[in-house]
Image (spheres, rainbow, N blue to C red):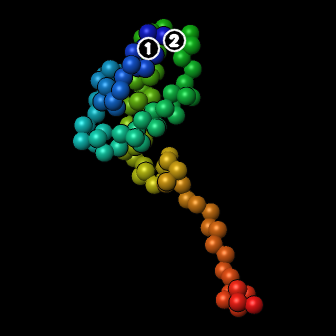
């Protein structure tokens, strides 16, 4: 692991990530949307290829991923993003059974 990855692995709050990567944020907004932002950030990090980058380029790429995740959370409602299972629309599975069919 790189030094940046070691540093990020030691962080425990969403605020820590923003401060460590020097990404500006609104503390109130982050308090409300932290899970959505971190979920977006994780998805963006998974898509990045950081191997072979120098430390400055790696930090820039990771900070850009965090800033983009923050922007995503601001522009898309959690229900529309479908990030968490609770927001995913279930497939209707109700079947109507007439009372006559039950009482025979």
**Residue drawn at x 70%, y 86% as measured from the top left:** 102
Q: In x, y percent, where is residue 69?
A: 42, 36
In the displayed structure, would residue 7 be above or below residue 65? above
Residue 21 appears in which quarter of the rendering? top left
Q: Work out which residue is located at the far front of the displayed protein and give it.
A: 104
* Crowd around label 1: few <14 · some 14–19 · many ≥20 (10 Å): few
Q: CA distance from mark 2 to mark 1?
A: 6 Å
Q: Earlier in the sequence, mark 2 or mark 1?
A: 2
- Cβ atoms at labels 2 and 1 below 8 Å apart: yes
Query: SS class of the residue under badge 1?
Result: helix
The residue lying at 31 percent from left, 45 percent from top is 32
Query: Dot 2 corresponds to which residue?
Result: 1
Quarter of the image for the C terminus: give it: bottom right
Specify whether residue 25 is in view: yes
In the image, residue 14 sits, relative to residue 54, either above or below, namely below
Label 2 secondary element:
loop
The one of 85 and 33 positioned closer to us in this rendering:
85
Q: Is residue 31 above or below residue 100?
A: above
Q: Residues within 10 Å of mark 2 (few under 14, many from 20)?
A: few
Q: Left or right: where does residue 94 sit relative to residue 14?
A: right
**Image point (33%, 30%), residue name:** 13
Whole-percent x, y for residue 7 in the image: 39, 15
Image: 3 above or below 9: above
> 32 or 103: which is nearer to us?
103
Looking at the image, which residue is at 67% across and 75% down? 95
Q: Is residue 79 left or right of residue 89?
A: left
Q: Which residue is mark 1?
A: 6
């Amino acid at each position: 692991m790189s030094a940046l990855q070691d540093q990020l692995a030691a962080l425990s709050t969403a605020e820590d990530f923003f401060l460590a990567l020097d990404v500006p944020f609104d503390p109130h907004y982050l308090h409300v949307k932290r899970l959505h932002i971190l979920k977006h950030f994780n998805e963006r990090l998974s898509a990045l290829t950081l191997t072979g980058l120098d430390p400055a380029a790696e930090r820039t790429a990771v900070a850009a991923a965090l800033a983009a995740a923050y922007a995503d959370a601001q522009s898309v409602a959690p229900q529309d993003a479908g990030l968490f299972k609770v927001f995913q629309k279930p497939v209707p599975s109700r079947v109507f059974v007439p009372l006559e069919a039950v009482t025979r």
